[in-house]
Image (cartoon, helix red, strand yellow):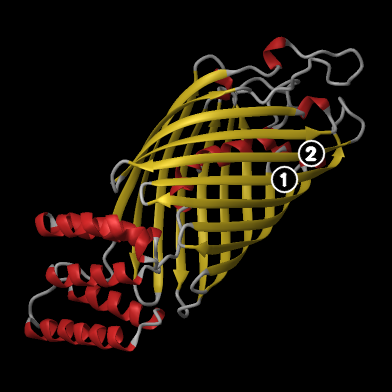
Amino acid sequence: MERLGSPNIVQWLITALLVVIQPLQAQDAEPVETGFPGIHTDYLKQLSTLSRSQPKQAIGSLENRLEQYPQWHRGRLDLARLYFLDGRYGDARQMVRQVMSEAPLPDTVRENTLRFYQQILFAQRQQPLMPSNSDSADWRFGGDLSGFFGYDSNANSGPEDADIGVDNRRLASSALEASDHYGGALLALNAYKRTDEFRWRHYLSIYQRSYTDQNDADLGNLRYLGELTLLTSSHWQVGLEWELSHYRYGSGTDINDISLTPEIQWRDKHWQISVQMEYRQRGYNFRDQQTLPESDKDADILGIGVDYQLRLNPNYRLSLQAHRVTNNAQADLYSYDATEVGAKLFYQTQPSWALWSQWYWRSSHYEAPEAPLYDDEREEDFHLLRVGWRYKVTAETSLSMTLSNYRNHANHRLHDYERSQLQLQLHRRF
């Protein structure tokens, strides 16, 4: 069985997943679809200067910007213009076609856009034997590098009280909550390709978080994520996501995940909704001398969920999620059903500053008594509240701070804990 007083693996993994993806949250929290010019005014001034001196860097910068704001049609037309000047006529045509099919353009703008499209075709016919510098099917590559440090009030997710409500047993002081400082880094590489019919994405990340004293709470993660999305129309898309992930927790536990997640999504100008179904296979490897058979915790995990995103106005974006998860472990002791609900609000005060908040709740009910410590099933309510701010030093570099509070209410005192974190992070996109 799990060693008395060791951090609960299930709740730890929830926390670990939230921490691992945190460097991406500030990026994902930006308004996904916005065509309001006020947000982009300062950026367009920088782009205009950059395009005159370093046109290829301007193209890369605008491509990254459009990944964050995929329905910024003015930016997409500007990218088409830069492609055209660079001789990338296939890419320029794709950008213009996408704007023509998705944007409700005024008559005058539509006429000018059509004339530009005809100009692209004419230029392409003038050089039939000369290939363009690129093509719409080419891959685009990029990456992210983050460094961070922080304070954790309960690094090992231990209970506050040594009395766990089991006869006269008491936890050792090393198993109780203990504060510590930590530091770490995230390196992520991605490859992206889009055509008129589909979108490919590959993502590889390496993450390490190390504590000063509580080394058993150190976390390492190696993750590969692949995604293929079919763009069936301007509103509908169908996708499949697959993931391979390895977690190394302290000096005692390795966790390996393999998952497949099909998804269907519908999006409009101001909102989008998606439905996902997930199958995940999880395997445990205990490197220390625990008596628990590894196969007892190995599990097949099934989930279904709905995500909804709404752009309230040019500065606000709201996202909501609701998921149902069933963890079928080899032993009923570790099998459970869970309901997850979450919300995230993003507010961009000005182009360089942004504030965001996140709330997440998970209710879990286990199938069998947690013997031999307790003679009844475990029930838990896990709450997360997170607030943060981000300042963009440049278009590619940002500084952020995040304050998080975790609270796990459990009917078994061994798993009842509270935890707070304060983290500062420097992020660079390349």
Q: Quadrant of the N terminus?
A: top right
Rendered image quadrant of residue 193: bottom left
For residue 200, the mark is none
At x 7% / y 81%, what residue is drawn? 127
Of 211 and 406, the residue lying toward us: 406
Classed neighbour count for the residue bearing mark 1: other residues with Cα under 10 Å, few (<14), some (14–19), many (≥20) = many
Do the residues bearing badges 1 and 2 touch, measured as CB atoms within 8 Å? yes
Q: Where is residue 324? Give x, y as percent.
A: 72, 55
Q: What residue type is labelled 1?
A: Arg
For this view, does 166 lie left or right of residue 224? right
Q: What's the residue at 73%, 48% (across, down)?
A: 327
Residue 364 picture quarter: top right
> Number of labelled discs?
2
Disc 1 to disc 2, how far (Cα)?
8 Å
Is residue 192 visible to us here?
Answer: no
**Is the residue 170 above or below the residue 187 in the image?**
above
Q: Which element is circle 1 on?
A: strand
Q: What element carries label 2?
A: strand
Q: Nearer the viewer, residue 193 or 106?
A: 106
Q: Name the residue under label 2.
A: 380
- Looking at the rendered structure, the kind of residue marked 2 is Glu
- Mark 1 lies on residue: 362
Find residue 107 and report its image quarter: bottom left
Give coordinates of residue 126: x percent, y percent.
Answer: 7, 84
Q: In this view, does 23 lie to the left or right of 335?
A: left
Q: In this view, does 115 lie to the left or right of 309?
A: left
Question: Does label 1 or label 2 sit earlier along the sequence?
Answer: 1
Residue 115 image offset from top left, x and y in percent? 20, 87
Q: Looking at the image, which is closer to me, 354 or 85?
A: 354
- Vertical placement of 113 versus 271: above or below? below
Residue sitting at x 34%, y 82%: 100
